[in-house]
Image (cartoon, rainbow, N blue to C red):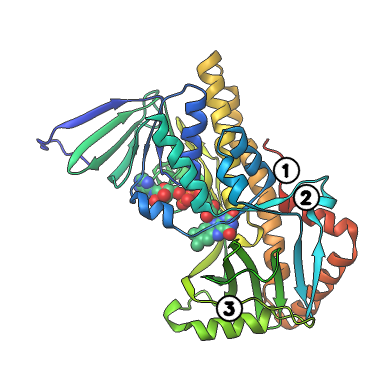
Amino acid sequence: MRSETDSRPLFRTRTQVGIVGAGPAGLMLGHLLHLRGIQSFIIEDRSEEHVIERVRAGVLEQSTVDLMHEVGLGDRLSRLGLRHEGIHVAFDGRRHRIPLAELTGGRAITIYGQNEVVKDLIGARVASGEPLLFEVEDVGVAELDSHLPKIRFRLKGGLHEVTCDFIAGCDGSHGICQPSIPASHVKIYEHVYPFAWLGILADAPPSSEELVYSLHERGFALFSMRSPRVTRLYLQCAPDENIEDWPDEAIWAELMTRLRTRDGWAPNEGPVTQKSITRMRSVVVEPMNYGRLFLAGDAAHIVPPTGAKGLNLAMADVWRMAQGLDAFYRSGSDQVLRDYSARGLRRTWRAQRFAGWMTSALHRGGNDDAFEHPRQLAELEYLVSSRAAMTSLAESYVGGPLD
Ligand SMILES: Cc1cc2nc3c(=O)[nH]c(=O)nc-3n(C[C@H](O)[C@H](O)[C@H](O)COP(=O)(O)OP(=O)(O)OC[C@H]3O[C@@H](n4cnc5c(N)ncnc54)[C@H](O)[C@@H]3O)c2cc1C
C-alpha cells in the first residue's frame, strides 16, 4: 500500500465494477456485465498460465451449462464436454446406477474441466478489450461503505488505484475481500471434516462412461474423468497426510481396492500427471455483502467437493449479482442488490445440506465409526432401492435453475 511519503506515481482509473479475482466467478461476472454494457476492471494476483492450469472442479450442473450457452460460450463445451445422464453409487462390491436425467425431467451434468471454463472466459474477456490484469501485487480494498469504494494494487512496481461504484470480491477462499469486512458485520460458519481428498489425474481412458462414487470399508473413493483419454480419481485420506508419502503405486493399489466391483469393473491405470491433497471444510459467510462490496463464489462459501457444487454456486452468485447491477444501472433501483445475500445464502445452505449429506454417507471415520458404517450401508441400500430417495439425490446433484 502507498504511504504518505511515497513518491512513486499513482495511476488512477475509474470503472463501474471492480472485480478482484479472475477465477470462474470473477471472469463470468466480467462477461455478464460486458454483455449488459456495464464496465468492469478485473485484477488477479496469479499468472494467466497458473489460473488456466489449476486443476479443480469438473462437474457442471445443468444451469451452469445453460448459462455458458446463453452467454455465447457454448461452442467448446458442446464439442468437448461429456454429458452424463446418470451416476453410479458403489458399496459392498456392487455398482448401482442412478438415472439422473430420467428422474429430473431430462436435466443432467456435464464433465468439463474448470480450466476449460476459465479458458473460454479469458478468451471472451480478451476479445471484449476490457481490462484483465494478471500478476498484480499488494491488493487492498478501501472505503467499502462509501459510494466510491477503491481497489489499490501494485503492478510492475507502479501503484494503481481503481475507483468503482461497486466491488465484487471474487478472490476465493484465501482472498483479501472477505477479511476486509469489519468483523462486527459478518458471521462466519465453519465445519472442518476429519478427512481430506487425495486426487490424481491419469493418462488413462475412463473405464466407465459415468462417475462412480464408492464407499468401501477402507474409505471413500471416486472415479471420474476429464476427457475420453484422461481419468480423474480421488481417495479419502487423513487431513494431515503429505502427498510425498503417496507413491503412485500405493495410490493405484488403494484405488483398486476401494473401487473394484464384483462384476470385474475397475479403473484403467495410466501415468499419473498430477496429484494433490485437499482438506475438506464447509464455510458460509453471512451476509455476502458489506456496503458496496459483494462477495461471490469461494470468497463467500466453501462446500466439500463430494456434491460438486463449488463452481456451480459461484456461477449462480455472479448471475444474480449481474442481475442486481443491471437493475441498478438501468433504473437506479437497488432492490435486487439488497436481496443478493439472502437469495445467495438460501442456495448456499441448500448446497451445504446436500454436500454434507453426500460426504457423511460416503466417508468413513466420523464419530462412533463402528456404528456408523452399517448405518451408512443401510442408507445406501435405501437410496438405491427407493425411487423417491434417488430422485432426491438426482434433483440436488443436477442442481436447480438459477434463482
Ligand atoms: C483442489 C480443489 C478441488 C476442487 N474440486 C471441485 C469439484 O470437483 N467440484 C466443484 O464443484 N468444486 C470443486 N472445487 C471448488 C471449485 O474449484 C471452486 O468452488 C471454484 O474455483 C470457485 O471459483 P471462484 O472464482 O469463486 O474462486 P477461485 O477459483 O479460487 O478464484 C479466485 C481467484 O482469485 C485470485 N485471488 C486470490 N486472492 C487475490 C488477491 N488478493 N488479488 C487478486 N486476485 C486474488 C485467485 O488467484 C483466483 O484466481 C475444488 C477446489 C479445490 C481447491
In 3D space, how far apart are the residues under numbered discs 3 and 1 (Cα atoms)? 35 Å
Quadrant assignment, res 96: bottom right
Callout 3 touching callout 1 (CB < 8 Å)? no
Residue 302 seen in the figure: yes
Where 227 falls versus 301 (above or below)? below
**Secondary element at image label 1:** loop
How crowded is the residue under tag 1: few (<14 C-alpha within 10 Å), some, or many (20+)?
some
Earlier sequence position, callout 3 versus callout 1: 3
Contact, mark 2 vs mark 1 (Cβ under 8 Å): yes
Looking at the image, tell me whether mark 2 or mark 3 is earlier in sequence order. 3
**Amino acid at dot 3:** Glu
**Disc 2: CA contacts within 10 A as few (<14), some (14-19) or many (>=20):** some
Residue 148 percent across, percent down from the top left: 36, 24
Mark 3 within 8 Å of ligand 1, using the beta carbon: no
The residue to which callout 1 is attached is 400
Quadrant containing the N terminus is top left
* Drawn side of residue 33 relative to residue 282, left or right: left
Up-down relation of residue 56 to residue 334 (above or below): below
Residue shown at 61%/62% (left/top)?
Answer: 228
The first of marks 2 and 1 along the sequence is: 2
Spatial distance from mark 2 to mark 1, Cα to Cα? 7 Å
User: What residue is shown with label 2?
Assistant: 395
Q: Position of residue 211 (x, y in %)?
A: 69, 64
Which residue is identified by label 3? 269
Which of labels 2 and 3 is toward the front? 3
Left or right of 397 on screen, residue 20: left
Measure how far apart labels 2 and 3 are at the Cα level.
Answer: 32 Å
Q: Which mark is residue 215?
A: none
Image spot of residue 339 (x, y percent): 61, 30
Residue type, numbered disc 2 = Glu
